[in-house]
């Protein structure tokens, strides 16, 4: 139950953030337009007439605008802090009661610490050397031709003769 609730909260967090950001953006736009003098509280359009009024309004409105922007930023930071604050989703359960001493884990029993990974095939030395020998035999087949024994009377070369290969050994004088 607690895990399901935690998952649902995580899913809805992203949606909440998007919705909050949209609200803050809309509020900023309304505030900016109100400070510029385009909208009144009833929503009608106002035209500025005198330069003196403009200066006075702009100075007052700038101070007010900066104060409101600062408040909005603080509210946004508080909302973020609330979203990203850690909440204990699962309360740690009390340890199971065990009679006498607790049992040790396999990791403690093996007591290997930090050891490198070793190949499974090399655990048994006999198998390791058997594999090494197999590998060397395969490599030697490329160097030395295997001996073929003749069975029955000579019936010619069974594999055929390739005139382009020379497998003979030159004798030095």
Image (tube, helix red, strand yellow):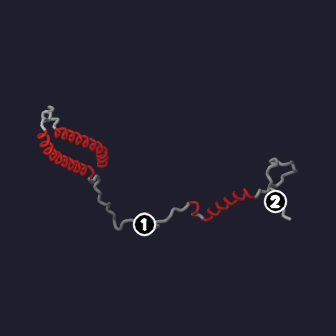
Residue nearest the viewer, comparing 145 with 162: 162
Q: Earlier in the sequence, mark 2 or mark 1?
A: 1
Cα separation, mark 2 vs mark 1, equals 63 Å
Label 1 neighbour load within 10 Å: few <14, some 14-19, many 20+: few
Q: Contact, CB < 8 Å: mark 2 with mark 1?
A: no
Residue nearest the viewer, comparing 160 with 23: 23
Residue 129 locus on image (x, y percent): 64, 64
Label 2 neighbour load within 10 Å: few <14, some 14-19, many 20+: few
Which numbered disc covers residue 80?
none
Q: Secondary structure at mark 2?
A: loop
Residue nearest the viewer, comparing 153 with 98: 153
Residue at the location (64% across, 60% down)? 131
Q: Is residue 3 left or right of residue 171?
A: left
Q: Does residue 92 lie above or below 1 as drawn?
A: below
Residue nearest the viewer, comparing 43 with 89: 43
Q: Secondary structure at mark 1?
A: helix
Residue 56 locus on image (x, y percent): 12, 43
Which residue in the protein does label 1 denote?
A: 108
Residue 16, quarter of picture: top left
Residue 79 locus on image (x, y percent): 23, 48
Work out which quarter of the rendered image holds the C terminus and state it: bottom right
Residue 101 locus on image (x, y percent): 35, 68
Which residue in the protein does label 2 denote?
A: 169
Residue at the location (77% across, 56% down)? 145
């Amino acid at each position: 139950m607690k895990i399901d609730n935690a998952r649902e909260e995580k899913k809805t967090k992203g949606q909440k953030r998007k919705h909050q950001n949209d609200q803050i953006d809309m509020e900023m736009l309304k505030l900016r337009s109100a400070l510029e003098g385009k909208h009144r509280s009833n929503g009608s359009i106002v035209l500025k007439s005198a330069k003196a009024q403009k200066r006075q309004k702009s100075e007052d409105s700038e101070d007010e605008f900066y104060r409101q922007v600062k408040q909005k930023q603080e509210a946004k930071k508080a909302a973020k802090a609330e979203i990203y604050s850690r909440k204990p989703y699962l309360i740690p359960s009390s340890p199971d009661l065990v009679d006498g001493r607790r049992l040790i884990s396999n990791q403690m029993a093996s007591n290997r610490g930090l050891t490198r990974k070793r190949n499974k095939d090399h655990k048994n030395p006999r198998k390791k050397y058997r594999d090494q020998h197999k590998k060397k035999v395969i490599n030697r087949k490329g160097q030395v031709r295997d001996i073929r024994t003749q069975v029955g009377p000579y019936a010619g070369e069974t594999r055929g003769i390739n005139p382009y290969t020379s497998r003979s050994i030159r004798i030095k004088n």
